[in-house]
Amino acid sequence: MAALVRALSCQTGVTQWIAGCSGLLQTAAVPGRCRWMLCSIFQHLSAKDSLQPSEEKVGAFTRIIEAMGFTGPLKYSRWKIKVAALRMYTCCVEKTDFEEFFNRCQMPDTLNSWFLVAQLHVWMCLVRLKQEGRTGKYMCRYIVHCMWEDVEQRGKVMGINSAVLKEDLKRMVENFYAALFGYDEGILSDDHVLAAALWRNLFNRNCDDPRHLELLVEYVRKQVQHLDALSGEDLLLTGEVSWRPLVESNARSILKPLSPVYNDEGL
């Protein structure tokens, strides 16, 4: 399996406008399906109007097309972002030592174990990119798209029956979004919550050695801090990320340096 992994690495005005349009829908002769879609859009916009981040002011038209599933204006061209997203996903699967994870964490050498380790690294990239506004979020979507394309291709090359592979992918999708929620909660909480998320999602509730959980909690914390220190512009344009080793003699050496402390004399 490990050899196969290596071989396959590849605001107010808007609110008033919405209210006016919503009233128009009550009297206009609009076809049923179109009417339902427009009502959903206006409800979505009304709910999100007060929640829009202050650093990203967007117009009503942008909100409408995004509510319909399209993408508004981005900082860079979609082609550049997709290339960077593919490269970032490649870094998740090519620069990660899966064999070391399997050996140190006593995980079975299977496609599912590979996916669980890969999704952990993908999640850490998503956390970092969501700090880069609309462009970062668009890049997140394409990274996830690349991941599912890769998982399906690996399953086919391994000779997994198409019906079985379809069911496996369905289960993986469900587990992936549950893992995202658990990891998000863990990274924002203390180490106990993060350890519980790793135990449920990475170890599939099958880990009796607390040292393995301690190792992975330390790994996630230092990787997230490492990614936070990377330039957002570089990530959006190149997609290049690197990973700290799973085991380090001094893991705290990669923490961000503390801000200088000055006395009253400015020294």
Image (tube, grey):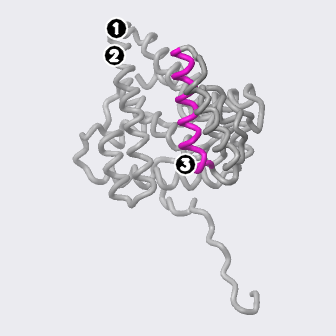
Location of the C terminus by quadrant is bottom right
Distance from the alpha carbon under mark 2 to that under mark 3: 34 Å
Q: Which amino acid type is shown beneath numbered disc 3? A: Arg
Q: Is residue 87 visible?
A: no
At x 39%, y 61%, the residue is 190
Q: Give the left or right position of residue 15, taking residue 197 as reference.
A: right
Q: Nearer the viewer, residue 114 or 181?
A: 181
Circle 2: element type: helix
Q: Which mark is residue 244?
A: 3
Residue furthest toward the left?
208
Give the x, y percent position of residue 206: 24, 40
Q: Which amino acid type is shown beneath numbered disc 2? A: Glu
The mark closer to the camera, 2 or 3, is 2
Please give the residue where the numbered disc 2 appears in the rendered image. 167
User: Magenta span has 40?
Assistant: yes
**Few, some or many C-alpha atoms within 10 Å of disc 1 (few <14, some 14-19, many ≥20)?**
few
Circle 1: element type: helix
At x 59%, y 33%, the residue is 23
Please give the residue where the numbered disc 1 appears in the rendered image. 163
Whether pointer 2 and pointer 3 mark residues with C-beta atoms closer than 8 Å, the reply is: no
Q: Which amino acid type is shown beneath numbered disc 1? A: Ala
Distance from the alpha carbon under mark 1 to that under mark 2: 6 Å
Give the x, y percent position of residue 192: 33, 58
Q: Earlier in the sequence, mark 2 or mark 3?
A: 2
User: Magenta span has 50?
Assistant: yes
Distance from the alpha carbon under mark 3 to that under mark 1: 38 Å
Whether pointer 1 and pointer 2 mark residues with C-beta atoms closer than 8 Å, the reply is: yes
The mark closer to the camera, 3 or 1, is 1
Q: Which residues are magenta?
A: 32-52
